[in-house]
Image (cartoon, coloured by chain):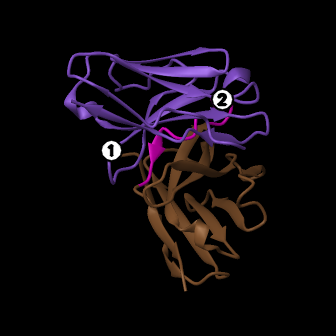
Amino acid sequence: QSALTQPASVSGSPGQSITISCTGTSSDVGGYNYVSWYQQHPGKAPKLMIYEVSNRPSGVSNRFSGSKSGNTASLTISGLQTEDEADYYCSSFTSSSTWVFGGGTKLTVL
Amino acid sequence: EVQLVESGGGLVQPGGSLRLSCAASGFTFSGHWMHWVRQAPGKGLVWVSRINSDGSSTTYADSVKGRLTISRDNAKNTLHLQMNSLRAEDTAVYFCARGPYSGSGSYYVGDVWGQGTTVTVSS
């Protein structure tokens, strides 16, 4: 199972919005509404930010939103804050009943 | 407090074995799927394995199939990962993660994660 494709890095200024893409295939992202997004600060455990494409767990800011079109899912962060600087990973359930992560995107808040 | 605490990591020679554990507390462990995810130094997250709530069903990434075995003891609220025939490329931080409640219809990897335990495979 190949990793989902994410941009290596994105950046934005405080208050701006950014979008991180996550491209897979019809066997994973495109085939199921089971895409999730994780935030990971250096040396810390990942944190679930979005599940089932666009659902936010309790306690996650509504500045984080998710969507999907075809084989590509997206995470949008609006009103960027310095604490949003972290690595972000997408993940999808697959047709093999396994899971796959993206390579990760480093978000820099300038 | 909902918590997962991994243990059992360490330095092991290529071809050796190690058994990781993940102690769960603060929630109904027996009701949730559980996952192992690993992260090599400076690299991204890689899904390793999943076990259903009663331990009757398991799935693995191709890279670990036949060498790593996931199991659980619901009486002791503990998840395990038996690691055999270890290779240098298995060197990573291993995280356990709480999956969705059985029957919920969700398929995320984890809404609660442990802090990770480090496995180093080297001679």
Residue B14 drawn at (x, y percent): 63, 81
- Callout 2: helix, strand or loop? loop
Q: Amino acid at mark 2?
A: Gly
In the image, residue A91 lies in the stretch drawn in magenta:
no
In the image, residue B102 lies in the stretch drawn in magenta:
yes
Give the colour chain B carries in the figure. brown
Question: In the rendered structure, the residue with mark 1 lies on which chain?
Answer: A
Residue A70 drawn at (x, y percent): 67, 15
Q: Is residue A39 above or below residue B113?
A: above
Q: Tell me the number on the disc at residue A41.
A: 1
Give the colour chain A carries in the figure. purple
Question: In the rendered structure, the residue with mark 2 lies on which chain?
Answer: A
- 10 Å neighbourhood of mark 1: few (<14), some, or many (≥20)? some
Residue occupying the point 60% across, 60% down: B75
Q: Is residue A9 above or below residue B3?
A: above
**Which secondary structure class fits the magenta region best?**
loop
Magenta residues, start to end: B101-114
Q: Amino acid at mark 1?
A: His
Q: Which residue is mark 2?
A: A24
- 10 Å neighbourhood of mark 2: few (<14), some, or many (≥20)? many
Residue B92 drawn at (x, y percent): 51, 63
- Callout 1: helix, strand or loop? loop
